[in-house]
Image (cartoon, grey):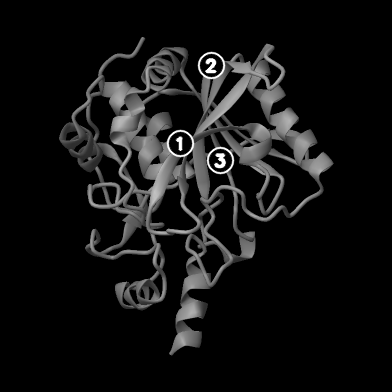
Amino acid sequence: MIRLLIILIACLGFAQAGHAGGGSQRNLPAQFKAEDIASFSKQVEKTLASKRAIVALVARNGRPPKNLPEGVRYTHVGFAVYSEIQLEDGNSQRGYAFHNLYQLPEQPDRSEIVVDFAMDFFAGASEMKAGILIPTPALQKRLYEAIVNNGYHEFHNPRYSAISNPFDTRYQNCTEFVMNVTQSAIHQTSSLAEIKANLQQSFDPFVLPYSKTLLNLASMGSQDISMKDHGYPVVTTTFTSIADYLKKHKLVSEVIELSNLTAVPIKIGRNFGRSSNEVELLDVR
């Protein structure tokens, strides 16, 4: 039975198996040479700067691609914010600070908000690949105000589940956190109930391609998977589902994938999932 549970958890891709760590943890074991991570991180920052991004959504993959569910490109998403960065020598320089919800390695069912930098963000990545979503300038402005004023902390729920349900408030993962903050900026609301109501009406989540029985078995062997917030089908938030949503409502300037130091457009299409009705969003111009 234990061996079966380990196999099921590994198949989920999102979750912690043994001591390997989940895909949304900080300080994962490095899979690449430090100079390669530094070079790629710098290329991500240069790409953001070339797009004149003040705030962008950036994703990386912390699990082997072969272990991810079909349709999932990344395991971790955070906000990259153009900032004045204080250096250890007392000087400062401008660059991108990464604002993340990270799963705690010693408590995989809990999370914290951490601000780090591109090198830290990609340090434990399983591949030198990044998803970059550039919101419209108006939405960037709203996100910037929410983040620099620390208002986004109120949307952090430290009860972590790798496959948290975006329509429920009991658990949260990094992508649901990013989506809640983005919804708050779009609708200019601090009401979590209003955010969830808007998502229920207009957001197409990622549908996990596993039976609920299988997922229930997997949750028995992993601290960072809970099924308490799920019905059926089992749904969660991904970088692609966020990109689909923002594109549908014309709130995206560009979505690209940076891989092997080459930026290419990502083809964003409708996720398979529950049907939804269009809703009118507030004008963010």
Quarter location, residue 145: top left
Query: Which mark is nearer the camera, 1 or 2?
Result: 2
Quarter location, residue 141: top left
C-alpha span from label 1 to label 2: 18 Å
Residue type for callout 2: Ile
Left or right of 120 in this view: 236: left
Residue type for callout 1: Ala
Residue type for callout 3: Ala
The image shows residue 15, relative to residue 134, as above or below, that is: below
Between residue 75 and residue 223, name the one nearer to us.
223
Residue 10: x and y, percent?
53, 71
Circle 2 crowding by C-alpha within 10 Å: few under 14, some 14–19, many from 20: many
Name the residue at the front extreme: 89
Residue 258, can we see it? yes
Q: Residue at x 23, y 63 (%)?
A: 228
Q: Where is the C terminus found, in terms of image quarters?
A: top left
Q: Residue at x 40, y 48 (%)?
A: 111
Which of disc 3 and disc 2 is earlier in sequence? 2
C-alpha span from label 2 to label 3: 16 Å
Left or right of 133 in this view: 271: left
Circle 3 crowding by C-alpha within 10 Å: few under 14, some 14–19, many from 20: many
Residue 73: x and y, percent?
56, 51
Residue 270, can we see it? no
- Which residue, given by chain and number where applicable, does mark 3 sit on? 59
Q: Where is the N terminus found, in terms of image quarters?
A: bottom left
SS for callout 3 = strand
Q: Residue at x 52, y 61 (%)?
A: 70
Query: Which mark is nearer the camera, 1 or 3?
Result: 3
Q: Which mark is residue 54?
A: 2
- Which residue, given by chain and number where applicable, does mark 1 sit on? 243
